[in-house]
Amino acid sequence: MTEQPVRDPLAFDALLTSSWALYRRNWTVSLPLFIALAIVIAALVVYFAVFFAVALATPSNSTVSPGMLTGFIISYIILIAVLIAASVWAYTATFGMAAAAWERGTASFADGNAAFRSRGGAFIVACIGLFGVAIVALILALPTLLISMLAMLLFTMYVMPAVVAGGRGGFEAIGESFRLVRRFFLPSLITCVVLYGISYGISLIGAIPIVPLELSVMPTTGQTTLHVPPISLIVLGGLGYIVTIVLSLAYTGFYAIAIVGMYRLLVAQPPLPASTPPAPFTSPPAAA
């Protein structure tokens, strides 16, 4: 007889309540993401400032020298390296601080930096594996009516907690995430829908001021040219976009705490009982 999976005893509202209480005491979990964003913006500003300065200083009738082209290529590679390093540090530090918050009730940047030093490599390997999973899901998107893309979000939801909080290797974390979702499907589905639903709702905040801005640009009846939108709508749209980014980064810190909490709960469940092996076959006794 097949054994039934162990049920998750924790109500989802209890997980959210505990996660919110931890986040209020450890709101600094979100700070690595803001710091990484500042680093990315600064790197982009420097890169494009140098690019346009060189372009303006170069006569219009002159060709780009090999040395200048090489400099642009090297600077672009450096820019990409900075972006990747900032992203890896931000996410490993965020999940490392989230794990520390659950373990001790408090989290610090030291916890985040320690997670980056010890788990950064595994995070990169996990990202490579997730990229492969995403390609497969994308190939299957049309035949499955996008169900493969939704399934990928669900079955990979515990990868980052497994890498940082569980100390798993990159590919090992992907496998563990698949196993946990398969074993605790309903709790994982509820967690995924609610957490991603909140994230999607936050993203819609930025669309509210964008809609009137887009409508103001559209030509009216009998006109074919686009309109210049009012300054007030441009400012309102920009502020809405900035607010959305701030809320999204702040929410990512809460998301890290919630998903790490769910992961810790599920891996703490007792393993499935081993199936009883069938009795060995023996020949029936000979008739007397």
Image (cartoon, rainbow, N blue to C red):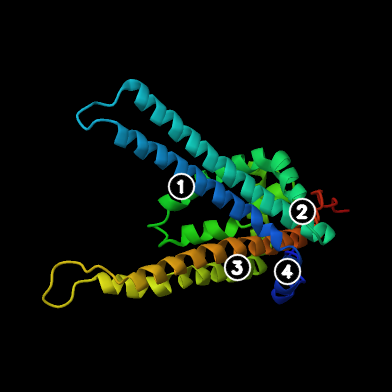
Tell me which corner region of the image, top left, top right, bottom left or bottom right, holds residue 67. Answer: top left
Q: What residue is pinned by disc 4?
A: 24
Q: What residue is pinned by disc 2?
A: 108
Which one is in front in this view, the residue at disc 3 or the one at disc 4? 4
Which one is in front in this view, the residue at disc 4 or the one at disc 1? 4
Regarding residue 169, the answer to whether it shows in the image is no
Tell me which corner region of the image, top left, top right, bottom left or bottom right, holds residue 101. Answer: bottom right
Q: Is residue 115 left or right of residue 194?
A: right
Labels 4 and 1: the sequence-earlier one: 4
Of residue 223 and residue 93, the one placed in the foreground of this image is 223
**Which element type, helix, strand or loop, lies under badge 3?**
helix
Which one is in front in this view, the residue at disc 2 or the one at disc 1? 2
Amino acid type, label 1: Ile
**Which element type, helix, strand or loop, lies under badge 4?**
helix
Q: Is residue 163 left or right of residue 127?
A: right
Say the numbered circle drawn on residue 195: 3
Amino acid type, label 3: Leu
User: Which residue is rendered at x = 42% and y = 75% of the image?
Assistant: 208
Residues at marks 2 and 1 touching, judged by CB atoms closer than 8 Å = no
